[in-house]
Image (tube, coloured by chain):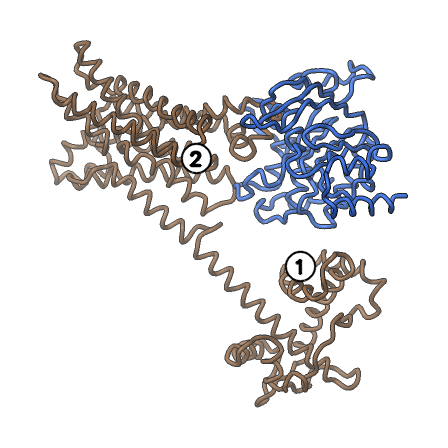
Amino acid sequence: MNSSTQTPSALPLTIRDLTVAYHRKPVLWDVDLEIPNQRLVAIVGPNGAGKSTLMKASLGLVRRASGLVQFYGGDLDDKRADVAYVPQRESVDWDFPASALDVVTMGMYRQIGWCMPVRKHHRESAREALAKVGMADFADRQISQLSGGQQQRVFLARALVQKARLYLMDEPFAGVDAATEKAIVTLLQTLRSDGATVVVVHHDLQTVPLYFDHVVLINMRIIASGTVHDVFTPENLRRTYGGRLTLLTEAVEALSRRQ
Amino acid sequence: MIELLAAQQPDWLRLVTLQDYNARVVLAGTSLLGMACGLVGTFLLLRKRALLSDAVAHATLPGVVIAFMVMVAAGMTGRALPGLLAGAAVTGVLGMLAVVAIQRWSPLKDDAALGIVLSVFFGFGVSLLGVAMRLEGVNAAGLSSFIYGKAASMLLADAMVIGVAALLAAAACLLLFKELTLLCFDPALAASQGWPAGVLDVLLMGLTVAVTVIGLQAVGLILVVALLVIPPAAARFWTDNLRKMIAIAGVVGAASGAIGTIVSALFARLPAGALIVLTAASLFGLSLIFGRARGLLWRALEHRMLSKRVARQHMLRAIYEIAESSRTSDARLSGIEIPITAVVSKRSWDEKSVAADIARLASDGLVTRRGDAVCLTRSGEDEAARMVRNHRLWEIFLLTHADIAPAQVDRDADRIEHVLDESMIDELESILEAQTARIPVPESPHLLRTAEELAK
């Protein structure tokens, strides 16, 4: 929208003193975070560390106890068009009466506006987005008939069609097949080289150094944040995961493979 | 009034042909009500809040009685429908808010919230009704018709109010089609895009209260939930497309309203509300069985066709693989006799079904049966070779390209093979061309047992 007026210092996402609590139990505690421009960022941490909550709280989907969140140096309400969100695949009912194309079109509803109908050129854009994720042939397929990987691709296409600059994706790699994982990674890299920033909640420690260039280690608070090279160290992982040995072994393996 | 018509029995023809103006208006009122309920109900069902309308409906009773008493106290007749409905809407909204409040601020789950609100409001309404009945010089008997509904008591003006409100609710559903769809499918995306998800939810709830309240007189507060739930549930069996679903739900609702009203007018003692709901239920039953998208009949037929195809492919492949393992040279496989016992022990089949499957293959000209043995025909060999080739391509693909234990591959491949399309097979071929020397039928990656071994 007002991308022309942005200053070079305006980072895609800046978080100050963010605290979130569910029923008095803190989930995120005094989080300070800056996401740099044009990076693939992994948010990594154990189960219940608040990874998804961090994303939802940034978008105002979860009530914040305190904290300030800015997108490209402004309030989210002024930057909606610059931000696209991909919720967890399990968060919706895939038995819903809709085709893949219908779901992707939903990405443009805001742009279409109140009470206005979806027009042909909107559907064309949706088809293009589906083609980008390799799902062109499935446009008219009922969504419950798609595999988990295909459903995830539909979700990605729905984000792509928003033509945002910052993409927030909640576990896009969860439960997808190897082919989809590869396709998603390629897509993320394309987005980055086109100037976008992609933040991904990620579970698989082994693939962090392969897929991402920036990593945020989180366990209720930010343990470390920076380039994968600087931050993704056994020491930081131990601080994030505590004594969970199997995970650490995996991570160390991944690290040694990188070197 | 329909009541009068019904009393003059011989005039049923006049009624069905809608020569009477009043009858036409009442019929239009209940049809529009049914349509609006179908439209609003579609979103309510997809939002998984269908039972909320039941709580709202029961919560309207105290409002109706209070409105009646207020109007009597003000010196009016106390029977004016708009006033009664306004009262109903007020306590209906209160009931809805109570449900939402319990859900949000207490640890109770949805079902408990609905149960509490529904019974408490209804109980309150019944007590108030008792009080109203005892008021001196007031005839409150008509109020109880709101519990079970009485379309026949509908006046011309009432039908107009109901019709106009129904049209407005339906128009709102169509105008907000996109917004409500997004709210029902993915509220998180809606909120992240900046839609006021809370406002949209309130709008949907408001529409629910509106159609529930206007349905009170015709169907009654106990049964009005049926008109919101049954038409969309029936529509879901016919289509996977929301636009079609909402249209079908509207038609089913309107048809239920119309047919129920006509039948109740024909048989003077039958209440319209119950008949409207029973009509909707019959349409639901038909949809459940015959619905094109998810009806039981089509599902059963499709399943039967699939299992037939799968059985045929398994049998052909079993015969082919046994023949392949027992052949001595590179000669053709057609004509090699394979004992039926070998086929039976190839998989966990019983002799009877094997015989039936072989008979079916034989009638298609793919195999010939010779006593206790079976052999492939020329065309059977070609067909089997094509299938076995697809199967093995897939097997090798799984072995080389995915982290799947070899022991699991055979079962998986069996399932996926039947749904593979040709472009996928082409793709597999090009991927595997480098790795397999014999593309026509690459060798099976696991050892096949020969006919002799299997016959043991």
| The one of B360 and A254 positioned closer to us in this rendering | A254
Pinpoint residue B70: horizontal percent, then vertical percent. 22, 13
Kind of residue at disc 1: Leu
Output the chain of dot 2. B
Q: At 66% from the left edge and 87% from the top edge, which residue is drawn?
A: B337
- Could you tell me if the residues under marks 1 and 2 are in contact, i.e. CB atoms within 8 Å? no
| The one of B26 and B290 positioned closer to us in this rendering | B290
Query: The chain shown in brown is which?
Result: B
Pinpoint residue B52: horizontal percent, then vertical percent. 39, 32
Quadrant occupied by the N terminus of chain B: top left
Q: At 85% from the left edge and 62% from the top edge, which residue is drawn?
A: B434
Output the chain of dot 1. B
| Picture disc at residue B109 | 2
Q: At 78% from the left edge and 13% from the top edge, which residue is drawn?
A: A5
In the rendered image, the residue lying farthest to the top is B74
Image quarter for residue A187? top right
Q: How crowded is mark 2: few (under 14 residues within 10 Å), some or many (20 or more)?
A: few
- Tell me if residue B253 comes above or below residue B417 in the rendering: above
Pinpoint residue B214: horizontal percent, then vertical percent. 31, 26
Image quarter for residue B130? top left
Q: Can residue B32 be seen in this view?
A: no
Q: At 75% from the left edge and 62% from the top edge, which residue is drawn?
A: B399
In the rendering, what colour is chain A?
Answer: blue
Kind of residue at disc 2: Lys
**Residue at mark 1 to residue at mark 2: CA–CA distance:** 44 Å
Q: How many labels does the image show?
A: 2
Quadrant occupied by the C terminus of chain B: bottom right
- Element at label 1: loop
Q: Label 1, on which residue?
A: B420
